[in-house]
């Protein structure tokens, strides 16, 4: 018995049909690594806040039920909206985590978000970055 090994490449054609290709498609240049969890949580906090403002959900408790998390956990996520705008932006654009643990996590940001003064938030944020 004889076996032949060969790489086969597929491409999407018209109407999503698969067809054979001569060579692999070039990658789209996706950066390696994963998006930090705090970046995803910050984006969710912004989206959830918009949902409440637009009346899509009544309050945080309803939002927590829909998201299948506890009400205290939803409050922790929503407290990220109390951060200074530049800190929120920095969280959203953190570099991907390629290897190991994330440098910034939500628990760190809790003590930053409890301050209502943005200048003290920025000082604490800087301390989180240095550590």
Image (cartoon, grey):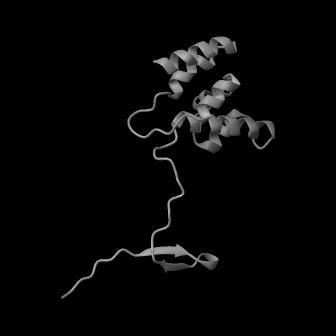
Q: Is residue 116 visible?
A: no
Coordinates of residue 47 in the picture (x, y in percent) = 70, 40
Residue 18 horizontal/vertical position (percent):
53, 78
Q: Is residue 94 left or right of residue 89?
A: left
Relative to 114, is 9 on the left or the right? left
Q: Which residue is at the front of the view, 74 or 37?
A: 37
Residue at x 66% of width, y 23% of height: 83
- Residue, x 64% and y 25% (percent of image)? 87
- Residue under the point 54% across and 57% down: 28
Q: Quadrant of residue 4?
A: bottom left
Quarter of the image that includes the C terminus: top left
Seen at 50% across and 47% down, the residue is 31
Q: In the rendering, at what x and y percent does residue 45 appear? A: 66, 35
Tell me which corner region of the image, top left, top right, bottom left or bottom right, holds residue 69: top right
Extreme residue toward the left, this view: 1
Name the outermost residue toward the bottom. Answer: 1
Image side of residue 17 versus residue 9, left or right: right
Q: Is residue 69 among the parts visible in the rendering?
A: yes
- Place residue 9 in its image quadrant: bottom left
């Amino acid at each position: 018995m004889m076996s032949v090994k060969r790489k086969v490449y597929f491409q999407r054609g018209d109407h999503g049909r698969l067809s054979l290709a001569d060579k692999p498609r070039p990658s789209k240049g996706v950066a390696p690594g994963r998006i930090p969890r705090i970046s995803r949580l910050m984006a969710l906090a912004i989206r959830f806040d918009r949902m409440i403002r637009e009346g899509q959900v009544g309050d945080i408790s309803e939002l927590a039920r829909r998201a299948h998390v506890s009400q205290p956990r939803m409050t922790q996520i929503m407290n990220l909206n109390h951060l200074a705008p530049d800190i929120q932006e920095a969280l959203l654009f953190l570099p991907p985590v390629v290897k190991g643990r994330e440098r910034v996590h939500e628990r760190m940001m809790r003590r930053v978000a409890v301050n209502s003064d943005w200048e003290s938030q920025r000082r604490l944020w800087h301390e989180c970055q240095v550590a």
